[in-house]
Amino acid sequence: MPEGIEIEIYRRAAERVVGRTVAAVEANDDWFLKGGITAREVTEALTGHEVVAATRRGKLLVLVMSNGVRLGLRFGMTGRLIVDDLSAIEYLEYASIRADPAWDRFGLRFTDGGHLRIQDPRRLGGVQLEPDEEALGVDAFTATLGDLNERVFKGEVALKARLMDQSRLAGVGNLICDEVLWRAGIDPARAAGSLSDQERSKVLRHLRRVLEDFLRDGGSHTGKLMPARVRGGRCPKDGAELLRRQIGGRTTYSCPRHQH
């Protein structure tokens, strides 16, 4: 967390700064500046220029400036976007619900008095000029069956690991992935290349529905499986005790009864 859902919510919030001109840059945390950039460089690149667009690819939010500079914002596991003192999303699973100014890692002040900032307790996010967007796979919101056949449904690697590989499919995190495969009835440990045509179509169909549902309900933590994602939790569909495993380096919950 946050996953592609939260970043899309952030992108929509960031649209409120489109048309505003940067008056000052707050970049006092050198650790948060990625790609070898300095506070002076990012300040010079942004100050005096207007935000002309807010775009997203997977978990990457990009502010496009009037001088052509692209500012990439990443939020790690606990990053929250705050625009004009309003948090774009109030709740992040596995993150503190407190809003501590000491966690402010980067900010933009605008000539109209407005403010955009990133709060990140664990400092796992970061800011970068000209991020390599092409290093990311196809965005989960726009992925087609052809995209998944080409990028995901191949080889002996676990299906969950493939779905969460941001270089193949950008925006799917742990909670989205478990929910999709739970709804689709497919074991996350299955080899990615082992799915039938029908199962592949089912994964895509549920991916689209999960993204739609989560976006409508306000976050990746709103899934039907989510309340049962605890030790000893039981499947909301059939009551079987959920399996808790490490797949693709992430804690994974799945139902041994209906996920095959």
Image (cartoon, helix red, strand yellow):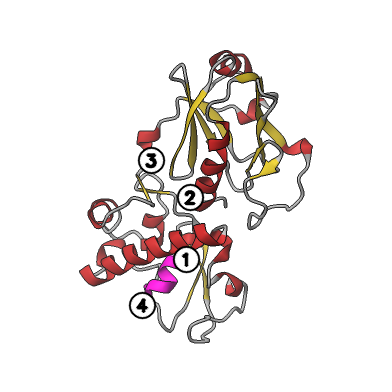
- Identified by mark 1, the residue type is Asp
Q: Which residue is located at x 28 percent, y 51 percent?
A: 151
Q: Which residue is located at x 45 percent, y 25 percent?
A: 130
Q: Residues within 10 Å of mark 1 (few under 14, many from 20)?
A: many
Name the N-terminal-most of marks 2 and 4: 2
Which dot, 1 or 2, sits closer to the camera? 2
Mark 3–mark 4 Cα distance, whole angstroms, equals 29 Å
Element on which disc 3 rests: loop
* Contact (Cβ within 8 Å) of mark 3 with mark 1: no
Query: In the figure, 239 relative to 213: above or below?
Result: below
- Identified by mark 3, the residue type is Leu
Q: Which residues, given as a range, are shown in magenta?
A: 178-186
Name the N-terminal-most of marks 1 and 2: 2
Which dot, 3 or 4, sits closer to the camera? 3
User: What residue sits right under mark 4 in the picture?
Assistant: 260
The one of 103 and 15 positioned closer to us in this rendering: 15
Which dot, 2 or 4, sits closer to the camera? 2
Residue 181 counted in the magenta span: yes
User: What residue sits right under mark 1 in the picture?
Assistant: 178
- In the rendered image, is residue 74 in sight? no
- Identified by mark 4, the residue type is His
Q: Residue furthest bottom?
A: 239
Element on which disc 2 rests: helix
Residue 32 % position (x, y) = 62, 31
Q: Which of the numbered marks, if any, corresponds to residue 4?
A: 2
Taking the image as shown, residue 226 lies to the left or right of residue 196, namely right
Taking the image as shown, residue 148 lies to the left or right of residue 240, namely left
Mark 2–mark 4 Cα distance, whole angstroms, equals 26 Å
